[in-house]
Amino acid sequence: MAFNSLAYTKVVGQNIGIGVTNPQKGKLEIAGALGGHTTVLTIGSDGAGISLQRNWPTIGFNQYRDVNNTQRFIGAGHAGSIFVSSVDGSIVFAQFGHGTPNQEITTATYPLYFNGFGNTIVNGTITLKNNVYLEKTLEFTNTPAVVSNQSGLNANLLAFAYGHIKSDGTKFRGTTNFTSAYNAGLSGYLIYFTENSDNAQVVITPRANNIPCYATYHKISQGVVLVSIWNKDGVKIQSDFSFTIFQ
């Protein structure tokens, strides 16, 4: 039988289903996956193509999962993926390095992800070329090294350290380069830094509810800062507080 390459058939109002008899979720609906596992669709599989995977919904860039659910490269080159955790709702960016067609992927890094609370977690170094405006928490697993066009010697756009310390002295959240404790003898909070904090400028915000108060600080030794919280009568009190340090 000969086919006219210019001929086509148009079916108006018809949804198309592959593996589903009554497609209702889109004009094209595909049910089932390769080997019954994950990969539903690959596009451009003759090169470094793209795959769509189910359950932990994934967009694979030159990556797919085979009939045994093993991750592999589609074609030659670098590979990565973006997936959504079905457990906590995180959106994760993954990188798999360089490989050859159908080679098994055995290593992965996760340089960036957004957790289920909408916070951004960066696993590594972030380089900023322009101003950044944040409406959510930005967390780093390592102290950020920032390169910017801001004037001034070694000027950084981000703080050296920041955090929220609870009234009992425990660390609630913040960068990974400090620990904290309440010292009853000093009636204040000691912040211990894993890096040199000399010549630092500290901004402290008490978080006491409906209690007028203010904060002071001074350096105890290299890498140790004492924070004191005072009420309006000049008496030291215990209170949650936030701090930011610019080096």
Image: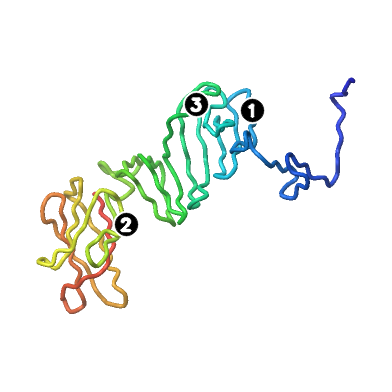
Left or right of 17? Residue 201 is left
Res 7 → quadrant: top right
Between marks 1 and 3, how big is the CA–CA gap? 19 Å
Query: Is 199 rendered above or below residue 229?
Result: above
Q: Residues within 10 Å of mark 1 (few under 14, many from 20)?
A: few
Mark 2 vs 1, N-terminal side? 1
Mark 1 vs 3, N-terminal side? 1
Q: Helix, strand or loop at disc 3?
A: loop
Residue wearing tag 3: 104
The percent position of residue 161, horizontal first and vertical second, equals 27, 51
The percent position of residue 173, horizontal first and vertical second, equals 32, 57
Left or right of 148? Residue 75 is right
Front one among 148 and 28: 28
Between marks 2 and 1, how big is the CA–CA gap? 44 Å
Circle 3 or circle 2, nearest the eye: 3
Residue wearing tag 2: 173
